Image: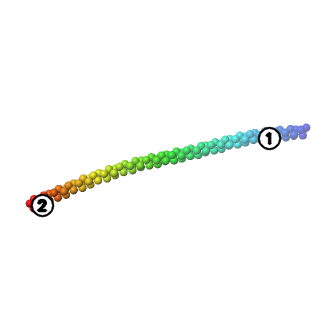
Amino acid sequence: EKDRTRRREERRTAESKRKEEKSHGDKNAETERKKDEKASARRSESEARRKDREAEKKRKERSLETMRVMSQEVQEKFRVEEESISEKRRKHKDEQRNTEDERKWRARKEAERKRSSFEAGKGG
């Protein structure tokens, strides 16, 4: 009788231990599953942030390239305008020089004419 009681107690104890271990196992499994989910979520967030950073970097590069192209276009327009302006100045200076040269030439011719008429008048 005592043996039977002792065995029954041992069985109950073993059974309750198994149940407890199973329950702990379930809890451990649940804890592991939650940890895995959190880790997975962190990884996907990290991956999403990395992709966002890459996309932002590409956007900045495209923006910089656009700015460079625009800058080159603006510089080209500016250069063309500067050339146009300097060409106009050059033409204007040439015209001034030509009119000045022409005026001097006319003045010289006039002086020669006067001198020759004066000499002709004096000699006559």
Within-10-Å neighbours for mark 1: few <14, some 14–19, many 20+: few
Residue furthest bottom as drawn: 123
Between residue 50 and residue 15, name the one nearer to us.
50
Between residue 31 and residue 71, name the one nearer to us.
71
Residue at (56, 44) in percent of width and height: 52
Rendered image coloring scheme? rainbow
User: Which residue is under mark 2?
Assistant: 119
Residue at (17, 58) in percent of width and height: 112
Residue at (61, 45) in percent of width and height: 46
Q: Secondary structure at mark 1?
A: helix
Q: Are marks 1 and 2 in contact (CB under 8 Å)?
A: no
User: Which residue is under mark 1?
Assistant: 17
Q: Can you tell which of label 1 and label 2 is closer to the viewer? A: 2
Kind of residue sitting beneath label 1: Lys
**N-terminal label among 1 and 2:** 1
Q: How far is mark 1 from mark 2, CA to CA?
A: 148 Å
Image position, residue 42 (x, y; %): 63, 44
Kind of residue sitting beneath label 2: Glu
Pick the quarter of the image with the C terminus: bottom left
Vertical relation: 16 (above or below) 65 = above
